[in-house]
Image (cartoon, rainbow, N blue to C red):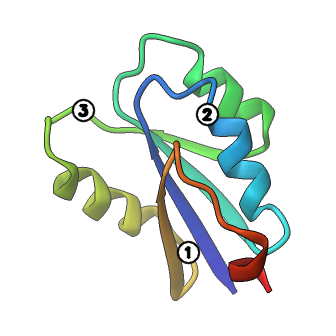
Amino acid sequence: MLSVVITAWNEATNLPRSVKSVKAIADEIIVVDTESTDDTVSVAKKLGCKVYSHPNTGIVEPVRNFSISKAKYEWILLLDADEEVSETLQA
């Protein structure tokens, strides 16, 4: 079972593409928002993602550690919201 964790800050435009690329392989998709000022949170919710918030610390490690703690499965794929999984990797 696979948890996909996507870190996002003002990624309402990119998030749908990223989520779409993992829908077929993920057992859960988590978006951790770092104080976005756009519609990132509402987009993530509309896409069916679990959404958590974390302060924007300016460095990724605290956010990633928080994100990992929210995943319920042993296998975790970490993505930024502007990244996507290729069809080759999905296979």
- Number of the front mark, 1 or 3: 3
- Front residue (pair 42, 69): 42
| Left-right relation of 76 to 59 | right
Count neighbours of disc 2 (C-alpha within 10 A) and say few if under 14, some if 14 to 19, many if 20 or more: some
Q: Which residue is mark 3?
A: 55
**Where does label 2 land, which residue?**
14
Between 11 and 56, the one lying in front of the other is 11
Which residue is disc 1 drawn over? 72
Residue 51 located left or right of residue 7: right
The image shows residue 1 at horizontal and vertical percentages of 69, 87
Amino acid of disc 3: Pro
Relative to 23, residue 81 above or below: above
Query: Which tag, 1 or 2, sits closer to the chain's start?
Result: 2
In percent of width and height, residue 28 lies at 69, 65
In three-dimensional space, the C-alpha distance between marks 1 and 3, rounded to whole angstroms, equals: 22 Å
**Quadrant position of residue 43:** top right
Outermost residue to the left: 58
Place of residue 2 in the rendered image (x, y in percent of width and height, measured from the top left): 65, 80
Residue 51 location, x and y as percent?
57, 41
The amino acid at mark 1 is Lys
